[in-house]
Amino acid sequence: MSDQDLLARPSGLASARAAAPAHPQQPHRANGNTVSLDDVPLNKFHIKIAGLTFGAHFTEGFALGTIGYALASLNKQMPLDAFWQGMIGSSALMGIFVGSLVFGWLSDRMGRQRIFLLSFLIITLAAFAQFYVSSPAMLCALRVLIGFGMGGDFAVGHAILAEFSPRKHRGTLLGSFSVIWTIGYVVANVLGLYYADTSPDAWRWLLASAGVPALAVLVMRIGTPESPRWLHGKGRVAEAQAIVLKYFGPNVTIDGAHDDHAPGAQGGFARLFEADLIRRTIFNCAFFVCLVIPYFAIYTFLPSILKAIHLDNGSGADFLLNGFLVIGALLGIWLTIKLSRRAFLIGSFAVTCVSLLALSVLPESAALWMIVAFGVFTLTMSAFSNLVGVFPPECFPTEVRACGVGLAIACSRLGSAVGTFLLPLGIAQLGFHSTMLALAAVLLVGMIVSIAWAPETKHLTLNQASGM
């Protein structure tokens, strides 16, 4: 039976709720006096939680975006061969791989709030420490540590915002992660473009500047409450109800009270591979990997990519492509609202695959068409990157939501770390066109996986989505 068949035929109390008539513009009421947490109106607290997670993603995009231009400047002080360029470029991604697994597991065991703070303490300290690096190995180690903190924040940030968000706005809020991340990444690129060569130590200031927004996010996160869904799942019902009462009012109920999984249900990574979850686990890991491999491989080394296609001599192509990243991310929010999750994902994989295929066959003399193909790729890739913040939190139940999100992120960052490490080697050994063809093949695999397994979760409550 397909995911769509399961979604069409929810069982038990979930079926009764799905069948109950409710006006699409009004909160669903369990009775005359109560409103479910999934359908509570958007309020200031939702905006605050979203702001804290958005600030984190700005910092993470900024920290990852600084490395491309910093490497070019660093190379003048500490000459780097292709091995160290690949290692430093992929080091944060390797850290994210480990951090998302470790902190995803800890978040499902210890709670969201502690990891919400700890992850950014690590990022802040490691980001500032980059100013004092004295060797490529030291910089690589600090970038791994930054990635370790990012991995924890990716896992817990997606989970905590999903668990607080009403379903009407959940797709927009979760999808907006990509927009804020992209803005941070582009700000870092613009800063690097104009500042990286201003002094011999400019790369130190550029890398360490990521500590400024990280410190601001860390301070503002102090006092964040625990997720009431997580508390309820651990049997701490009174604490969960107290948080709901404080931030949402006396007439709001926790949907977790009606989960198919009883309070105290056990999670862990093994749960993700049980019969009812394994297909969702494989899908989320596979589509995520296929999306981010070309993204990080290309944009970590954007200056080198533009040089390879002769677009680095005052053409303004880098500025144009960074603009496309921002426009695409904003377009992605609108498309997330208007399109089904499944159609958006499959169609975007197709467009980006064709774009890179065009880059692999166009001659270097066709500069204009290369810009067009790269622009279409950038716009579309940035738009459907929004879905990496939407699908994983919606596909997993509360007791393993952070583990599921963490595993998907870990797999994606392992894949993107390998891709980022191999990209400069691939261009040096195989050439630009063959490397683009290989990345197009990765996107084709993502499209095939999405056609086979992508579910549709757009109109479901969080419990229905995770119980499909």
Image: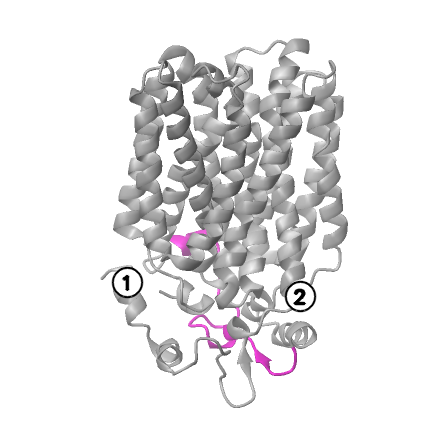
Residue under the image location 44 percent in, 21 percent down: 423
Horizontally, residue 448 falls left or right of residue 147, namely left
The three-letter amino acid code for the residue at tag 1 is Gln
Label 1: element kind: helix
- The circle on residue 194 is none
Residue 242, quarter of the rendered image: bottom right
Horizontally, residue 416 falls left or right of residue 342, namely right
Provide the residue span drawn in magenta: 249-273
Residue 202 locus on image (x, y percent): 72, 20
Residue under the image location 50 percent in, 24 percent down: 317
Q: Can residue 105 be seen in this view?
A: no
Is 234 colored magenta in this rendering?
no
Q: Is residue 117 above or below residue 82?
A: below
Q: Is residue 247 above or below residue 350?
A: below
The three-letter amino acid code for the residue at tag 2 is Phe
- The circle on residue 4 is 1
Question: How far separated are the C-alphas under marks 1 and 2?
Answer: 33 Å
Viewer-side label of 1, 2: 2
Residue 454 locus on image (x, y percent): 32, 53
* Mark 1 crowd level (few <14, some 14–19, many ≥20, 10 Å Cα): some
State the quadrant of the N terminus: bottom left
Residue 240 locus on image (x, y percent): 63, 72
Residue 264 locus on image (x, y percent): 53, 68
Residue 161, quarter of the rendered image: bottom right
View extreme (left): residue: 1
Q: Can residue 200 be seen in this view?
A: yes
- The circle on residue 45 is 2
